[in-house]
Image: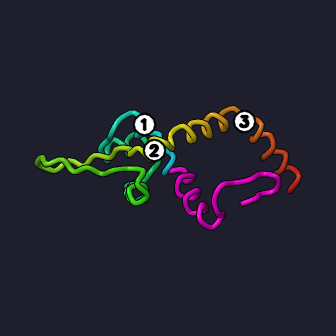
């Protein structure tokens, strides 16, 4: 697929849903938090303070559906559920860190651009 002067691998209609999923802020945060080690649901919820229980459940299911996260039920009483990155999920970490790094390096510039845009709109 060609976008302007860039040759992008894949078909836009095929990769758009994947980019939407992995580019979602909650998905990105869950993947980044799971880089440390496998974690239980409430650990994830504590580390991603602003996420609701429903949104974390939805996000984990979606990541599991895509094969980025694996859910393991440990045979204890009560059962303990743990989430971990799969090999595919681990392969997403480097691009996510690169995007986080780019965002941090350009934060001030983007804030200035947004302010200038808002001023022009008023």
On whether residue 11 falls in the magenta region, the answer is yes
Determine the residue positioned at 42% across, 50% down. Answer: 68
Q: Which residues are magenta?
A: 1-26
Estimate the spatial distance between the alpha carbons at disc 2 and disc 1, rounded to whole Å.
6 Å
Percent position of residue 86, x then y: 38, 46
On whether residue 67 falls in the magenta region, the answer is no
How packed mark 1 is, by other alpha carbons closer than 10 Å (few <14, some 14-19, many 20 or more), is some
Percent position of residue 90, x then y: 45, 41
Position of residue 12 relative to residue 5, above or below, is below
Q: Looking at the image, do the residues carrying marks 2 and 1 touch, with CB atoms under 8 Å apart?
A: yes
Determine the residue positioned at 20% across, 47% down. Answer: 80
Q: Does dot 2 land on a helix, a strand or a loop?
A: helix
Task: Work out which residue is located at the far bottom of the displayed protein and give it.
Answer: 13
Q: Which mark is residue 121?
A: none
Picture quadrant where residue 44 is located? top left
Residue 88 located left or right of residue 110 = left
Percent position of residue 105, x then y: 69, 32
How packed mark 3 is, by other alpha carbons closer than 10 Å (few <14, some 14-19, many 20 or more), is few
**In this rendering, the label closer to the viewer, 3 or 2:** 2
């Amino acid at each position: 697929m060609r976008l302007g002067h860039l040759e992008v691998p894949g078909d836009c209609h095929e990769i758009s849903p994947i980019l939407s999923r992995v580019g979602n802020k909650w998905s990105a945060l869950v993947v980044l938090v799971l880089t440390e080690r496998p974690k239980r649901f409430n650990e994830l919820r504590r580390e991603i303070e602003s996420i609701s229980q429903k949104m974390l459940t939805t996000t984990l299911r979606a990541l599991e559906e895509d094969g980025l996260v694996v859910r393991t039920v440990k045979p204890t009483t009560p059962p303990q559920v743990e989430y971990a990155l799969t090999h595919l999920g681990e392969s997403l970490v480097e691009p996510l860190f690169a995007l986080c790094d780019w965002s941090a390096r350009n934060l001030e510039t983007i804030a200035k651009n947004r302010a200038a845009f808002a001023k022009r709109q008023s």
